[in-house]
Image: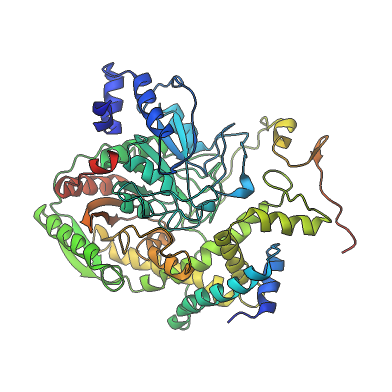
Amino acid sequence: MGEILDLTAAEAAARTRAGDLDPAELWRTYRERAAADELNAFTWVSEDAEPPAADGPLGGVPIGVKDLFCTKGIPSQAGSKILEGYRPPYTATAVERLTAAGAPTLAKTNQDEFAMGSSNENSAYGPVLNPWDRTRVPGGSSGGSAAAVAAGAVPWAIGTDTGGSIRQPAALCGIVGLKPTYGAISRYGMIAFASSLDQAGPFTRDVTDSALLLSAMAGADPCDSTSLGLPEPVRAPTATDLRGIRLGVPQELTGEGIEPGVLDAFRRSLEQARELGATVEPMRLAHAQHGLAAYYLIAPAECSSNLARYDGVRYGHRTGDAGELLAMYTKTREEGFGPEVKRRVMLGTYALSSGYYDAYYGRAQKVRTLIAQDFEAAWERFDFVVSPTSPGVAFELGAKTADPLAMYLNDFCTVPMSLAGIPAISIPNGLSEGLPTGFQLAGPAFSENRLLDAAHALEGIFGFDGSGARA
Amino acid sequence: MLSRDQVLHVARLARLELTDDEMERFGGELSKVLDHIEKIAELGDLAGVEPTSHVVEVENALRADEPRPSLPRETALAAAPDPAPGGFRVPSPGAG
């Protein structure tokens, strides 16, 4: 069992496909670990002792799926009480593709309610604990997926990233998290938060696993008219150096607000990038400092619209204290939504309301354009833009729950890429105070193969050892 | 600072029935967040900037209009809190 646990997902898949490892043994090993999880990383674990038949490049290596992906007949509650017990009649395209490629769903992972949060403390099913230190958060919103992969309770997992919900928890748990280009993966069957920003992506132990999972998930889907797929097949990354690669270091994401230990790790990583042959130069993303404000208008505005569907009529919770129709709506939503969801619905409704629309939502959309233009200008001089993924390491449970704004500020390094729709990956680059730090690498839209290659080279020189969290 | 009336108005638009405690708490919290968001006013006149509603430049994503099976009615109704034969039952809209 120890040996199985030491394999990356790609290594395990190679062995099962060569006939050197029984996929049933792999399934049983991880099912036992997932069932014994003490981090509250899961909202559902398969009770099947034997895996479903699987065939394909992913070799039967089982996967953890964030709760907000609809999975037919399996609870899909998006971390919300309003969807308690909901079993959808269909499965999300991304999950269908993984199943077809040979990765059976082993478990559903815990998350912040409707993906709103940066600590996983907003789940109606309780917070997830960080496997590196159980008094700390795993990050969010895909905290269950990140903690489960880091703890070795699943070989790999998928989550979603709206403003950093893959990259930040990956950083805080010491694993690799990739947010692909917007449109690379279908959103069909993903319970919506902010539709112009939501994007699925992989959580893995290393960059090679990330590429393998992305290769199976990406693709245009007739059920999502904004999905495009990727322009070329995802390759297994092989680069071991960064010769000729130009890295831009934006002042706005690498100075004020970053914890000293995180900044030290980041600077050491830049030195290592130079050793691999990269050039590293400071640059500006002039509007990045306004990214957070724009994000916290656009995402709540879209959420207030998307979450209008939870009205106690077609699925989910309905109040037992109905009265007339309008009271049924307002009481159902009052009972079913947690405080953070209510805050964002209120914020978004306010930003879209008559008299405020131009000053808030309309203006935020223009700032979004300016941020996208900053990145476009950056690509004329640089191959990638790099920064710490999270301004700090994993914080104590409860440390920021009383102050929503302090919680939102966690996202300032990750939201600019989300607003621009570009791909970004977080790879673990060291420890600060004994806790993992993350290095974020962002590239132009659809540059996934180059991004994964550069991340692979960096991962080699960083030499991060995550095995401590799997004990 | 958002007034209690403003919070009440927004809650009504959002179809949320807030408790008095929530009303108090959200008023303060949302005001603080809005103070931060006001930073985007610093950017001055953005009249010449096009808004971005979506980063993907896809227009007229059309497919052939061919009939295909949809979910059976019973399946679509299975998760409803109060299904009626062939539909969803809801309380009366009342007089208001």
Residue at the (44%, 28%) spot, across then down: A104
Q: Is residue A369 visible?
A: no
Query: Is A471 situated left or right of A278 in this image?
Result: right
Q: Residue furthest top?
A: A19
Q: Residue furthest right?
A: B95
Q: Position of residue A199 (x, y in %)?
A: 45, 49
Is residue A120 positioned above or below A32 on the image?
below
Query: Is A334 situated left or right of A19 in this image?
Result: right
Q: Position of residue B80 (x, y in %)?
A: 73, 40
Residue at the (48%, 75%) spot, across then down: B37
How is the rendered protein coloured? rainbow
Is residue A100 positioned above or below A419 on the image?
above
Query: Is A236 situated left or right of A268 in this image?
Result: right
Q: Residue furthest left?
A: A275
Using the image as rendered, state which of residue A294 and residue A148 is in the foreground.
A148
Using the image as rendered, state which of residue A88 and residue A3 is in the foreground.
A3
Residue at the (38%, 25%) spot, across then down: A27
Is residue A3 positioned above or below B21 on the image?
above
Q: Quadrant of residue A437?
A: bottom left
Is residue A226 positioned above or below A395 on the image?
above
Q: Which quadrant holds the C terminus of chain A?
A: top left
Using the image as rendered, state which of residue A132 and residue A4 is in the foreground.
A132
Q: Which quadrant holds the N terminus of chain A?
A: top left
Label total for image:
0
Q: Position of residue B49 (x, y in %)?
A: 47, 74
Q: Is residue A171 visible?
A: yes
Q: Position of residue A240 (x, y in %)?
A: 14, 44
